[in-house]
Image (cartoon, coloured by chain):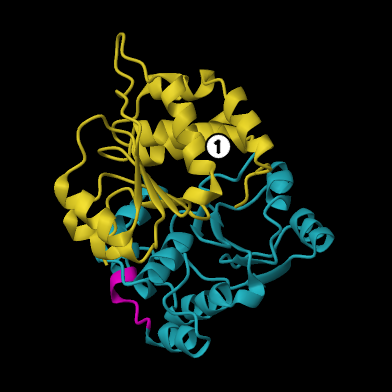
Chain colours: A yellow, B cyan
Amino acid sequence: MYPPENFSLVLTDIYRSSFPKASNFGFLATLKLKSIVCLISEPYPDENLAFLEQQNVQLFQYGMPGNKEPFVKIPETSITQAIKTILDPANQPVLIHCNRGKHRTGCVVGCIRKLQNWNLTMIFDEYRKFAAPKQRALDQQFIELFNEDDCWCYANDMDLLPLKW
Amino acid sequence: MYPPENFSLVLTDIYRSSFPKASNFGFLATLKLKSIVCLISEPYPDENLAFLEQQNVQLFQYGMPGNKEPFVKIPETSITQAIKTILDPANQPVLIHCNRGKHRTGCVVGCIRKLQNWNLTMIFDEYRKFAAPKQRALDQQFIELFNEDDCWCYANDMDLLPLKW
């Protein structure tokens, strides 16, 4: 069993990882995923698409740039849309991934922790575990300043609060 | 919500963390724990005992030393016993903790990953995330050499394999 790098369970039926390679497909099959939320903009590889089709896994692609000094910032609307897709029980079990599973994925997970009312210290502590040694202050600032009202309303309307563990 | 340091979900209904303090009790209450598996030998603090009683959480204490150069080694029997208690659905949701949530807890989680057939590289990668910057080669060697046959038989007899995510 070869999990992708930076693989972890975020909440029951919500996983995170780096970009899965063919060597990880055997492991991924055991998760019985219903969908994948991919945060990169580039076309999804044919090999991965074939695996998803064979496993009947739906792909949601929310392409976004990572936060980069000085002027590149993840669009909040993309994160909001990704989070709604992730939280929708109809799409779970779901795997969130970008390339390394560090920055964009870390921002999404950090924003989900805000919906769980975690304090920022512990959100950043988790972010840094997965981003190390490439943690970015910009990502942590993004999480801190992210306006989660829209996600909050969605989760509330869907009767998902408090988020189940 | 203040999760304890090094808090994370290991598998559904199995959590890990550092030693919970009073400031974490509010957060812990949301987990609706049925039990706690504590890996340190010292008496459990009165404040924590009172919280467990109030929440009707059972305490299993498997005191063990951490692996330390040159001659201190975690007893395999203690880890085996702890793992059986953790895997028993009757005790879940369960929280595993030691003092820092790094070494003894990391060894237990690493041995659980062996039961999931993870390859050692990814087991060690997860271990180091939580143990950093204090990762110990001895702990990783302990995980590698741990004989999981007894846990395996137990999980098989209890019809728990493959371990559910």
Query: Residue B36 sits in which quadrant?
Result: bottom right
Residue located 69% across and 61% down the image: B33
Magenta span contains residue B78: no
Q: Which residues are magenta?
A: B143-148
Residue A88 is left or right of residue B145, and the answer is: right
Residue at 47% over, 49% down: A91
Q: Chain of mark 1?
A: A
Task: Please name whichever residue, B27 or B69, is drawn nearer the observer in this view of the structure.
Answer: B27
The answer to whether residue B146 is magenta is yes
Front residue of A13/B76: it is: A13
Outermost residue, top side = A71
Give x and y (percent) for residue B163. 45, 73
Name the spot of residue A156 as percent of width and height, x first.
68, 36
B8 or A110: nearer the eye?
A110
Say whether residue B132 is visible.
no
Check disc 1 and give the amino acid type.
Arg
Give the mark count: 1
Kindly state the secondary structure of the residue where label 1 is placed.
helix
Residue A165: horizontal and vertical position, in percent? 60, 52
x, y percent for residue A160 = 65, 44
Disc 1 residue crowd, few under 14, some 14–19, many 20+, Cα 10 Å? many
Question: Which residue position is annotated with label 1?
Answer: A113
| Picture layout, residue A140 above or below residue B127 | above
Q: Is residue A49 above or below residue A43?
A: below
For the point 34% across and 69% down, which residue is it? B143
Q: Quadrant of residue A99?
A: top left
Quarter of the picture holding the N terminus of chain A: bottom left
Q: Is residue B53 above or below residue B146?
A: above
Residue A6 visible in the shown view: yes
Along the line of sight, which residue is nearer the eye, B35 or A24? A24
B61 relative to A44 in the view: left or right: right
